[in-house]
Structure formats: C-alpha cells, structure tokens
Image: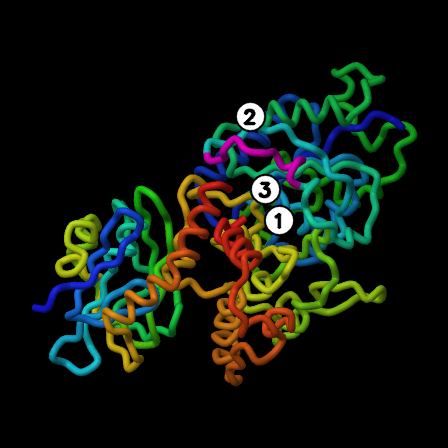
Amino acid sequence: MAPRKLTVVISQAPGKNPVKHELEEEIATQLMLAGTCEVSLIPNLYDLPADHHGLLWLRSISGDLVVLSWLYERAARWTLDRNGISGLEGITQLPKGADDDEDEDSAEESADAPQGIGSVRKTNRHIYVMDLRQHHEAAVYLEEIQRIAREAVPPPALVPLEMSFGRPEASPGEAIAPVPAAVEFKLPLGFPGMVPAAGETAVAVPVTDPRRRWYPVIDYSRCTNCMECIDFCLFGVYGVDQLDRILVEEQDNCKRGCPACSRVCPANAIIFPEHKTAAIAGAPTSAAGDFKIDLSKLFGAPTALELAAQERDTELVADGREAVGLSIGIPKRQSAQAEQPKDDLDNLMDALDDLDL
Amino acid sequence: MPDPLQFMMGEYQAIIPVDRRYFRNHMWFQMSAEMNTGRVGLTAYAIRLLQDVYFLDWTIDPQTQVVLKQEIGEIESSKAVSSIFAPAAGLIHDFNPALMQDPSLINGDNYSTGWMFHFETQVETMSAEEYVAHLSGSWEETQRVLKGQYNA
C-alpha cells in the first residue's frame, strides 16, 4: 500500500468558548505547519445530521484516522460508528490528565468489560480518539499525533519534503477513497466541501453550528441486545435492524435532557455524550470525587430505575400523556425482587452502584 | 424539654432531639405554627457521616414543588459527596440564606441555625423514637456500604 498521510479530524466544541476554540486552532495550525498529517475541523461531531458534508467526507476516508473531540472517548467512538465510520480501536498514549487518578488504564478495563454484540461494521483501519478536555496544552496532543503518525504510516517511500507538498490522493496505487468532488475547495482550517467562512462571501449560506441535538449512542462493545431500552422508552426512539439488533432509530424523538434509558440499561451501554453525569456521558471511570465516598444512597437517592421512571414521567407529562411510573417497561428481574429483604449480594451490588463507575 | 435520644455510631453518640419529626433520609422536620410547614435540616447522624461541610448548592429554585427523592442540591464535605434529595413530596419554600454564606453552620449548629430549607408536606413523618429504630435497623447496612466504598 502506498504511504499516505494520517488524517486528523478535530470536532469543535459547540458554542463560542474562546479557550476551547483556541486549543482547536492551535493544534490544527501546528499540524498543518508540520505537514505530516491531513487536518480538518468539523463542527461538534455529536450534533451533525447524517447527511452533513462533514460526515460525508469522514465516511470517504479509508485510512487511519485520529479524532479529537470534546467528548469522552467512548462517546466519540460510538458516535462515529453510528454514522458509518468504524475501524479498529487505536490505542492512544496520552499522559494522564490532571483530573485522572493513577488506577488502571482503559486497556485493562476493557478486558473486564462485559462482552457486547459488537459493531456490525468491520473495517481494518485504526481510529484513534482523544478527549480534548484531558489536557490544556496543544503540545501534548501534537506529540501523541506525531507518535501515531509514525506508528500508523509505513516508513515513507517519498522524502518528507515531497510528502508535505504532494497531494496524497494523487499517489500511485491509492485509489480506494473516493475523493469528494469539492476537494479543490480545501480551506486551511476546514474540510473539503466546507462553506467559506462568513464575511468572505456574499452567498447567503450561514456558517452556523448545527442545531444542538440530544439522543442516545449505543456502545455495541457492551450492548447485549437485551431490549430493555426498547421496552422502557415510550417515545419510539429505539428500533431493530434487519438482523434484529437494537438501534437508535428515531433519534430526534428523544427528549432533551432525559437519560432514562441509560439508567435502565443493565450493561451501561447507552451513552448520552452531553449528560452532566460522567458515567452516562461515556466516562471510563467515575470522574470527580474519586477519593470521596458517595453518601447519596444513604441520603435517600432514588435507585437508577426509580430515577429513570421519574425522568420518563416528566417527559410523558410534558407531552400531554399520562405518567406511568414503574408500571411499564420495567425489567421483570427487578420487580420480582422488590419485596424481598436484601441479601449480602444485593448489598454488595448497592455498594458497587454507589461507586458510580 | 425532654431529654434527647441518642444513637451510638460506634463510639460516636448521635443526638436525636425529641421536639421534632424525622424523615428516613436523615433529615429532621420542625413544624412551625403553620400547619404542615417547618424547617428541615440534617440529623447528627448525617453530619457524622459527612463531617466538615465545604460546599452546599441548591439545584432548584425556592417555591418549587418536589416529589420524593427528587434531586434538589449537592453537598460536599471533607469525607463525602452526595446529592441532596427531597425527603418527601411537598413544597420547598425557601433556603436558609445563612448557609449560602457559610455552609459550615451545618456542622456547628445542625439542629437550629444550620437548618436547610422551609418545607411544606402532608406526608407522614417519624417520631424521634421511630427514627432511632430506623437507624438501628439500617446501621449494619450503612457500615457495609461505607466499607464497600473504602475498600474499593
């Protein structure tokens, strides 16, 4: 296979946070100056509609990919998968962020993770995902991207100078990726097909962020296809595909702010990337307060199921429907146990629940 | 005033006054002259588990109708973090402004100036005796939950 450049995609933070945008632009600028990668900026990955040109372009890339976003790695990876962009999990070696503690790394953790049904798509390239919230300095990311570039790309047959000027898609033997027609359009800090920035043109196509969205993202490495989410959600978000695999079918039926199905999922496979609770947003381990005990249970916290039912009722009532409480779509295994006194195993599980993993 | 009850948490003696009512989630309820309305605060049992309170934040506005177990705020102390949940269905009238300035009042004077909010509820509450019985019944499990977290 001909040498090709690594593609680096930066999914921008929604909103106008100058600190975040500065970090994005610093990374992009440095990468372009180095010339060893193709770099593009896209709006917040999670908010992109399926036919957004940023996604169309991402789907056209067949080689190794580095994606930097303001999402947890799992959230970003499975949001990509959902949009038809899949690949083998590239292992990143970012130094631990200041907020992380020194426990096991994600590789060890995934070994213990429950086995899910996996992605339907199999692609032989690697996708490396990084969370831009982990570090404040661009240098950390740049160093890791350079490391990945060395790992991912075979030793260049071309001298580096040629590589940085040559168009990779023009390399001999490289005919896999259909190059988007709009490639001539390539802007320094954009992606092929991007509309020129406002102010540069009189064309009345505003370059605004896509509408903020809210929908579940399924982590198929955990999902066991148990169908509890489809039974629980009364808004028709979930469906099944031709292989009877669960999928998020009508994502825009989902109720903004409601993470109820995620709480019901026995495999913790449902991610709401924008939820304030780290565990629901796709964090590998509990984020803040790791050294403190969580007394919520003792202070009357509802169980995950009670909370899920509460959240669902709120949305049902907002839609002018009847609240159903715990009467519909509640897993049988739980309701059968409700009347019995807790045994040691229950207490152990409660203690584990409190860890908010 | 009659002598308060006490509950032994290991060596520690948690004082439970008998001049007020209690909720299961370790909050006391002292009714004012107004029917079904009064101040709510944390019991000595809760304070002992938390120890020094550093941070208190309410996530709902005053005059909010709440349901049982609804999340209404967050508390962080030297030992623990927790959300704060509504002790029962009812109306939260307002919050103790003094605590907003200095949450450590909860430690200093939890049964009077360290009150948390004005609450109105029709729900049945427990007497001090019933609350102490509730504590005795759940003490084993509480210790297991705590131990589970320390050892994790």
Say which mark, if any, is on residue A75.
Answer: 1
The secondary structure that dominates the magenta segment is loop
Question: Residue A299's spot in the image, x, y percent?
Answer: 36, 60
Label 3, residues with CA under 10 Å away: few <14, some 14-19, many ≥20: many
Q: Give the mark, 3 or 2, whose residue is nearer the N terminus.
A: 3
* Residue A178 visible to the viewer: yes
Q: CA distance from mark 3 to mark 2?
A: 14 Å
Q: How many marks?
A: 3
Q: CA distance from mark 2 to mark 1?
A: 21 Å
In this rendering, the answer to whether A301 lies above or below A147 is below
Question: Residue A135's spot in the image, x, y percent?
Answer: 50, 32
Reading the image, the residue beneath label 2 is: A140
Q: Amino acid at mark 1?
A: Ala
Q: Tell me, yes or no, whether the highlighted magenta stretch contains residue A104.
A: yes
Q: Amino acid at mark 3?
A: Ser
Say which element carries label 2: helix
